[in-house]
């Protein structure tokens, strides 16, 4: 017969599971932050025109240029959302709509210099919002 | 005594050399003067420079010699028009009653005679009574043929001692019927203009003095658009700066969270 009570074993197991979950959540926060920073730098380089390797060559390159800019912003938004969401979950506070709105505006603001990039980014951000709304736990 | 003689002789030679060399510089034929057309408000083409209305205020202003006749040349651009003013300052009686100023326009920056295909002329019939006509010619093998349709505007007026000539020449004319007799001016290109002067209404025989200048025509940049662009650039810089600062703060918070987690574990 075991000397450790069953309740204590259960507590230890749940504690270990929780620690492992926290570790996993923390790792997710770090990875998604790193990814969001990478896409932030890509967006900074292309959307401000520091790098313009695809611009003003021909129509195909123009399309590639627009797609690259839009995707950089959308992925920045997505990974930042994941990162902040997980961070907030770990600290036990929910993500407020103000933070959500600020991130939305700051992401859209990166596309100010190009009308087409702005329009496609806006549509993309709305789609991400709809997706996140649909997948969230009720 | 001999020394003084040598001194005077060498001094005279030196002065002569200086005078001759300066005359050579004045009369030498170099490359045509290049003029950048400045942007400004469109003036009234009436032979009058209205200072109260700040007419020609922003024009590029220079003085050139039509052979040996010094004239003031002003060049300005507004929307789809190139404005040129030529002013001749002479004694009243020295102005010939039938003087004219003509602009022979090359179809490029080429100064070859055969490339000057268009002529815009303000011809006085009686300068003292301000009677003039504006003429538009097509030059074909040095023959001046009157255009079927006149384009642009021209006017002249004797204001005291100064005869003032004003021209407006269209930029980016459509290549349709009636326009093929004119030189087509395009943005971001240079055109050779032969500024000519004469005193008898006969072309080209009446031309007595001339000078070629190169005029650079630029595409206008809308001021409002420029302002919007500047605002957008400022906004995007602010945006990226805010994201950068917040990211830095967020990374700091993540490290703090890790420390907190480790503390809770131990």
Image (cartoon, coloured by chain):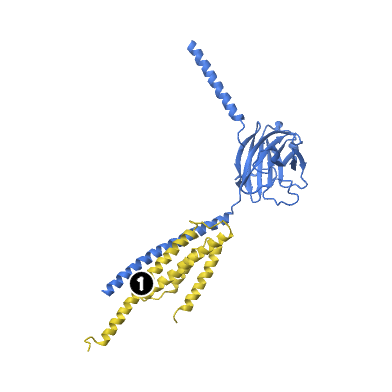
Quadrant of image for the C terminus of chain A: bottom left
- Residue pictured at 49% horizontal, 73% vertical: A129
Residue B55 visible in the displayed image:
no
Q: Foreground residue, A134 or B214?
A: A134
B213 with respect to A123 (left or right): right
Q: Where is residue A28 in the image (x, y as percent from the top left)?
A: 38, 71
Q: Is residue A90 above or below residue A51?
A: below
Q: x%, y% of residue B201?
A: 76, 36
Query: Is B179 placed above or below B200 here?
Result: below
Judge from the rendering whether residue B69 lies leftward or rightward of residue A122; answer left or right.
Answer: right
Residue B121 is situated, as x and y percent measured from the top left of the image, at 72, 40
User: What color was chain B assigned in the picture?
Assistant: blue
Marks counted in the figure total 1
> Which residue appears at 31% of the width and 76% of the height?
A19
The answer for which chain carries disc 1 is A
Picture quarter with the N terminus of chain A: bottom left
Q: How crowded is mark 1: few (under 14 residues within 10 Å), some or many (20 or more)?
A: many
> Foreground: B265 or B105?
B265
Query: Which type of secondary structure does the marked residue at label 1 adopt?
Result: helix
The residue wearing badge 1 is A26
> In the picture, residue B57 is in which quadrant?
top right
> For the point 43% across and 66% down, which residue is it?
A36
Q: Is residue B96 above or below residue B18?
A: below
Where does the image place residue B265, in percent across and percent down from the top left?
Answer: 28, 74
Viewer can see residue A17: yes
Depth order, front residue of B117/A102: B117
Q: Colour of chain A?
A: yellow
Q: Residue furthest top?
A: B1
């Amino acid at each position: 017969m075991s000397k450790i009570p069953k309740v204590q074993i259960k507590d230890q197991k749940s504690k270990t599971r929780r620690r492992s979950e926290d570790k996993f959540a923390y790792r997710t926060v770090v990875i998604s932050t790193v990814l969001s920073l990478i896409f932030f730098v890509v967006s900074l380089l292309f959307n401000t025109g520091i790098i313009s390797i695809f611009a003003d060559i021909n129509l195909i390159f123009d399309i590639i240029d627009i797609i690259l800019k839009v995707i950089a912003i959308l992925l920045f938004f997505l990974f930042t959302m994941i990162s902040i969401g997980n961070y907030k979950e770990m600290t036990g506070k929910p993500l407020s709509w103000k933070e959500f709105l600020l991130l939305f505006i700051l992401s859209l603001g990166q596309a100010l210099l190009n009308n087409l990039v702005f329009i496609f980014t806006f549509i993309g951000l709305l789609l991400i919002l709809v997706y996140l709304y649909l997948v969230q736990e009720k | 005594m001999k020394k003084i003689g040598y001194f005077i002789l060498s001094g005279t030679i030196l002065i002569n050399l200086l005078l001759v060399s300066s005359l050579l510089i004045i009369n030498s034929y170099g490359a045509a003067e290049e003029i950048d057309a400045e942007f400004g408000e469109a003036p009234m083409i009436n032979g009058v420079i209205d200072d109260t209305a700040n007419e020609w205020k922003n024009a590029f202003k220079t003085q050139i010699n039509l052979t040996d006749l010094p004239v003031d040349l002003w060049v300005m651009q507004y929307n789809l028009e190139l404005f040129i003013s030529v002013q001749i300052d002479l004694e009243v009686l020295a102005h010939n009653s039938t003087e004219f100023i003509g602009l022979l326009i090359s179809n490029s920056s080429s100064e070859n005679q055969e490339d000057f295909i268009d002529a815009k002329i303000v011809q006085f019939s009686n300068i003292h009574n301000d009677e003039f006509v504006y003429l538009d010619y097509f030059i074909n093998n040095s023959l001046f043929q009157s255009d079927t349709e006149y384009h642009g505007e021209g006017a002249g007026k004797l204001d005291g001692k100064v005869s003032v000539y004003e021209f407006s020449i269209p930029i980016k004319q459509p290549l349709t019927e009636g326009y093929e007799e004119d030189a087509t001016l395009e943005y971001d290109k240079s055109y050779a203009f032969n500024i000519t002067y004469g005193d008898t209404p006969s072309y080209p025989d009446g031309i007595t003095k001339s000078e070629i200048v190169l005029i650079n025509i630029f595409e206008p940049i809308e001021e409002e658009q420029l302002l919007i662009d500047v605002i957008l650039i400022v906004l995007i810089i602010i945006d990226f700066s805010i994201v950068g600062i917040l990211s830095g703060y967020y990374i700091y918070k993540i490290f703090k969270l890790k420390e907190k987690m480790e503390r809770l574990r131990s």
